[in-house]
Image (cartoon, grey):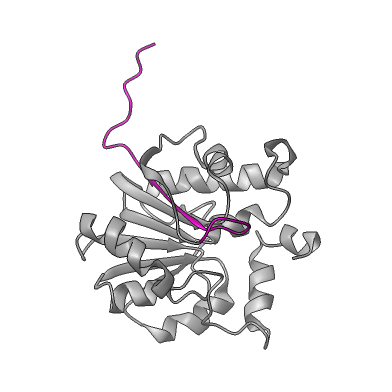
């Protein structure tokens, strides 16, 4: 993907244009489908959360994952937070039981704090980061640092204490932790990053972070 296009991926206008294009019609996956994720979900997610858990899919785009988690996983309370009105118009009719909120995940002021049990991110974090050089932390553009940390802080805010922030992405652990474990958050690892695809370039991992049950006590 060209660097110029990558730099535009944090804007709603980019995605509106993309989803309205005849070459990129929803629904379709950025990468792993529900079938690809099913083993991970059944082993590491579903046993821990009842089917009435409140789940948010930030930047859901054209993915069928929210639809499949409802129809095949049995989850009944699913919200997609998305800033592209174009993709909302195309995806919402596919399952009217899923709520769609038009909002920017970097500023979800319309969503109450401590509202969700799980925030399940498949490729939203990737889109905010773009596709530039990722192996050297010193080369990360400042806008990506600001965007992803605002996003992480907002996810921390909207999650209930003890809630899970699941991130499916191709980035290495040190990059993910550098970007998401920032001031204004207090993420704990639920388990080590889990590989979902074979080792090598574009290896996809599942990261699961937890919002603590209570805020750490200030001992200073």
Furthest toward the front, the residue is 199
Q: Which residues are magenta?
A: 198-220
211 within the magenta span:
yes
Of 202 and 47, the residue lying toward us: 202
Of 150 and 102, the residue lying toward us: 150
Residue 37: horizontal and vertical position, in percent? Answer: 40, 67
- 62 to the left or right of 119: right
Residue 169: horizontal and vertical position, in percent? Answer: 53, 56
- 114 to the left or right of 93: left
Indicate whether 47 appears above or below 139. below
35 within the magenta span:
no
Residue at left offset 52%, top offset 58%: 204
Indicate whether 80 appears above or below 179. below
Residue 151: horizontal and vertical position, in percent? Answer: 52, 49
Of 129 and 158, the residue lying toward us: 129
Residue 38: horizontal and vertical position, in percent? Answer: 35, 69
Q: Quadrant of the C terminus?
A: top left
């Amino acid at each position: 993907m060209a660097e110029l296009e990558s730099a535009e991926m944090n804007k709603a206008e980019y995605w509106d244009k993309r989803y309205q294009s005849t070459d990129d019609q929803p629904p379709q996956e950025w990468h792993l489908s529900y079938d690809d994720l099913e083993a991970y979900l059944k082993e590491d997610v579903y046993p821990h959360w009842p089917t009435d858990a409140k789940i948010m899919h930030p930047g859901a785009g054209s993915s069928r994952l929210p639809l499949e988690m409802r129809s095949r996983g049995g989850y009944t309370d699913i919200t997609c937070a998305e800033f592209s009105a174009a993709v909302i118009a195309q995806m919402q009719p596919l399952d009217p039981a899923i709520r769609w909120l038009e909002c920017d995940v970097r500023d979800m002021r319309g969503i109450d704090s401590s509202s969700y049990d799980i925030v399940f991110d498949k490729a939203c974090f990737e889109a905010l980061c773009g596709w530039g050089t990722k192996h050297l932390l010193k080369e990360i553009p400042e806008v990506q640092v600001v965007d992803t940390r605002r996003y992480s802080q907002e996810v921390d805010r909207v999650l209930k204490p003890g809630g899970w922030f699941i991130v499916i992405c191709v980035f290495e652990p040190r990059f993910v932790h550098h970007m998401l474990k920032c001031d204004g958050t207090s993420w704990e690892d639920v388990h080590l990053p889990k590989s979902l695809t074979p080792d090598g370039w574009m290896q996809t991992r599942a990261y699961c972070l937890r919002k603590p049950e209570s805020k750490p006590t200030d001992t200073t």
